[in-house]
Amino acid sequence: MMLGITSQESNMWQASRSAVPGVTGNPLIGNYYGIDLYDGDSSNDWDIDWAEADCGYGITQVTDHMRMAGREDGKGGAAWDYQKQRAVALDYTVNVAAGLQILAEKWNQTSSAGLKVNNGNSAKLENWTFALWAYNSGFYADKGDGSPWGLGWTNNPANPEWDAGRTAFMEDSFGSESPSDAAHPQDWPYQEKVLGFAAHPPSYLESPGTMVAAFIAAWWNGGDGNATIKGAAKQNRALVKPPENLFCDPVENSCNPAYIGDGAKNETGAGPCLRDVDFRCWWHKSAQWKSDCDYSCGNDFTRFPATWAEEADGTAYPPACTTNGLPAGARIVDDVPQGTPVIRPGCSNSSWSNAGTFTLDFGEGDGVHPTAGGTDRWPAKVDLHQLGAGFGGHFYFGHTRKDDDKGQRLKFTGTWKLNAPLTTDDAKVWVHLPDHGAHTKLARYEVKTAEGWVSKTVSQPGTTNRWVDIGVYRFSGGIPEVRLSTITADGTGDQDIAFDAVAFQEGDFSEIPEIRFPDEDLTAPEPEVMEPPEVIPGNFLDLGSITGLSAKSSSPSGENNLRTKATPGCRTVNESKEEVICIGAGPAPEAKKSSKKSSSENISGSAAALNATTGTETVTCSVNEASVSYTRTYACMTGTLILERITSGRPTGQAIWDYRHEIQLDTKSGTFMQTASFKMKSIAGFNSVSLDMEFDCLGACASDPTIWTNSQTWLAGDLHTLVGSKTMKWTGTSGHSMILPSWKFTGKGDGRAGETIDREKSELEIRGDLEAKATSGKPGCVFHRYIPTYVIDSAKNPSAAAFYWIVQQKLPTHPGSRPHKKPLHYNSDSAAATEIREKIICHRTGDGAFLPHPDSGVTTGGRTGPSCDEYPFASSYESGGAPVATGGGGVRGDACLQLYAKKPVVSGDLWTLKEDTRYPRRNTWKEPCGRASLPSDENSNAAWRIGLRLVPENRIIDGDAYWVYAPGFEDCTDLTKVCWVRTR
């Protein structure tokens, strides 16, 4: 029966419902804040009313004597001594003892007043009905003045508050267990619920994931059968519930049993209690509903004999009491002060000390204290809970809230603050997350940095105690703070949000590789132009047509895979003989190993091979490797051309040429030259063959007649080479426009021609223009699909080269990097570039202004540096200050990566590139741009060559793409090691 009381009162919990077995927490308190949750009005569910506070504590919900001394207000007797109250609240054994004493007191109180149930044998469960009744709603002693006295109306089975005609609690009408009754216990009076739990113990959590029966059930004598069978044990058990009218008598307690029913109410004339003003229909007589109670009443099972030792404490969710998982030397700020006792065993917290304070802010609160003049009601405090787990054996938690009026009312904020400044500008912040009691995935931590409060969203759920790195922040001598509130983006009041410990790890977190580079060399030669060709593998002449017999194997059926008149390039020349003449691509060269790099890999190549003239074999213009290759001003197409005659399905003639076709453009002229050569490799079956090629173009172009060197006809055995030259000209008169070259090939065998084949290549579209800057108004032509490369003069401008290189390597946009396929795009608007450079990225006044670094020095006389350099360049659409809509970063200079070139202290030492920590925002290496303090002359020299060299030499116009390459960093492949720059 006593275990039934603990089930009904507290689910057998000494601690609050948030603490699982084995974890310490707040004591369970009935209704500490006096909140009315059951009035059907959800709008007042957080309204604190101290006058209605219920001071029921712990597993037996001890209420008497548990109010504050001097605040008893006539409720529950005089307050116990404070230490005794603490023992009842915090020690379950003391609480159970107090509950047993109260229950025994109620038995003695009712018995002394002459109230007895059945035969009064205290060994039988039903006979405790009056004591249980009084335990919950009290016993009113006889004053001897004729006024009502006895057991209160609340728990009288006749009270309309309870469901009329109900079965025994936790049973159906057949005496079988009905666990669903526990979901609506408000339909039974207190004593019936206790005895129902005694007969049907619920299951509770014993440890995480393990549910067990709370105790072994009481038992009843009787035979087999259900509750409808007389003498059955189930019937005797069902009769633990007395008749509902047993304690209702018009004479004894002004109660009319005729009014008991589903429609009854505690209202005037509507219910059995005839005292409808004060409802003091109190019962004070003995009662009997089992005449053979010694046999038919319930018997207990002693779950814990007095001789048993106390069971060991649970060990669920053990706390983390060391600094495992945290870098050595990190400064910890816990959520409780140093020296706070830890209730969990084995948690001495001796390996660390608390280096700061933790505070909680509950907002403005609701009400004003009538005498002190201050707020004494903070609804947010209702949602503050604590558990003996996590780091150091303690953490707080609340529930996530939406950022609305209700959420703000219930919001509380925890703040961790170091007690002294850091010794470094930057520090990594760690937060400790417990292994339970942390459910939100959107905990919004805020860090107070040198630039203000910065937020970081963290997912808290996990199955282990762990330290989580939430980033590196710049504090610049300030005292770091971290705060967290219960407001989240998805707050509903359902998910836990934990407030555990925070730690600050001091150190150098610049993440910049150690780069060593020499002083500038003003005598160094100009860097070599880098123009690796773009190569498109495959025979230019092959557009998918079938090659001839000499190039194909037989088909699986054994028949030769021959061209027909339907094949492109083939024409029937004799129907009766089924004879066709075909012209097309020959077989691709046999694959062979090559050391040649692709254009995306060949970032340190030379343009020397591109100055080839007609007839010169080069790596990218060789008939041995059929392909199309091109640079900004030069293209070459190679392959094999075949003319075949097929008669009745068998080859009867064949001629094979090696084909090479070169186009040479001129950036200083609108005129360009095409040269095609056809070298006869073999001729068989024909008496003579001839070949013709037409050069054509689509767009603003004109051309001179083709000049052929050597005969266009070959006789049997003749292996001469035919060369054709064509001069063309862009005819535009302003701006720019395109030319698309195309070609037609026609072959004849013994005077009979095959079909003409047409070829073109979109990659070889030519652009002529009169708008490229620094070209003296003269026209010029380029293959505009080829992306040129701006080579930084690393020898003369080593700090600028190092700056551009590290930005390319580490920023996620990799601006200008060929290996990452992230070219820059030229912005020809000089005024816009100046605006970006001087007023957005490198401005000297106002918020986010550039700060020249004194260690950047001046390397030559006449310069006033150091100065601001930006990358991507202000003259590119990718510039950090350019609008996002055009491809830029859309930010101000202080949102860029902040670096500076550090001159050597000792003459002859090397320069380095460092993070500039004078700005409040630290580098994240996720910025859209870089800003650096560099020697003024290097800054100027590194940039001017774009306009004076790159733009005119490649006829770059607005929107054109280009790569940026800084030679000297080829050995810097591992950014975790020192990068030695080779500029000489």
Image: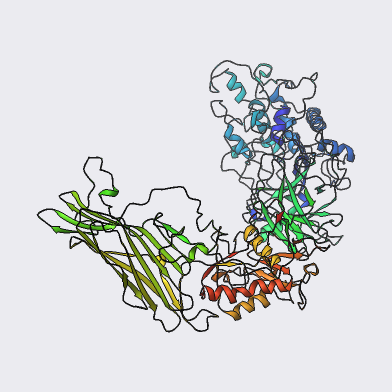
Colour mode?
Answer: rainbow
Q: Position of residue 172 (x, y in %)?
A: 55, 29
Residue 187 relative to residue 283: left or right = left
Q: Residue at x 88, y 36 (%)?
A: 84
Q: Residue at x 48, y 75 (%)?
A: 667
Q: Residue furthest left?
A: 576
In this orientation, does residue 557 appear?
yes
Up-down: is 206 above or below 85?
Answer: above
Between residues 332 and 299, which one lies in front from this camera angle? 332
Residue 249 relative to residue 414: left or right = left
Between residues 662 and 467, which one lies in front from this camera angle? 662
Q: Count the marks: how many?
A: 0
Up-down: is 863 above or below 436?
Answer: below
Q: Residue furthest front?
A: 717
Residue 84 relative to residue 725: left or right = right
Question: Which quadrant does the N terminus fall into?
Answer: top right
Q: Position of residue 519 (x, y in %)?
A: 74, 65
Between residues 531 and 253, which one lies in front from this camera angle? 531
In this orientation, does residue 366 appear?
no
Between residues 796 and 877, which one lies in front from this camera angle? 796
Q: Residue at x 68, y 36 (%)?
A: 156
Q: Position of residue 764 (x, y in %)?
A: 41, 67
Question: Which quadrant does the C terminus fall into?
Answer: bottom right
Task: Give the quadrant of residue 242.
Answer: top right
Q: Position of residue 296 (x, y in %)?
A: 64, 19
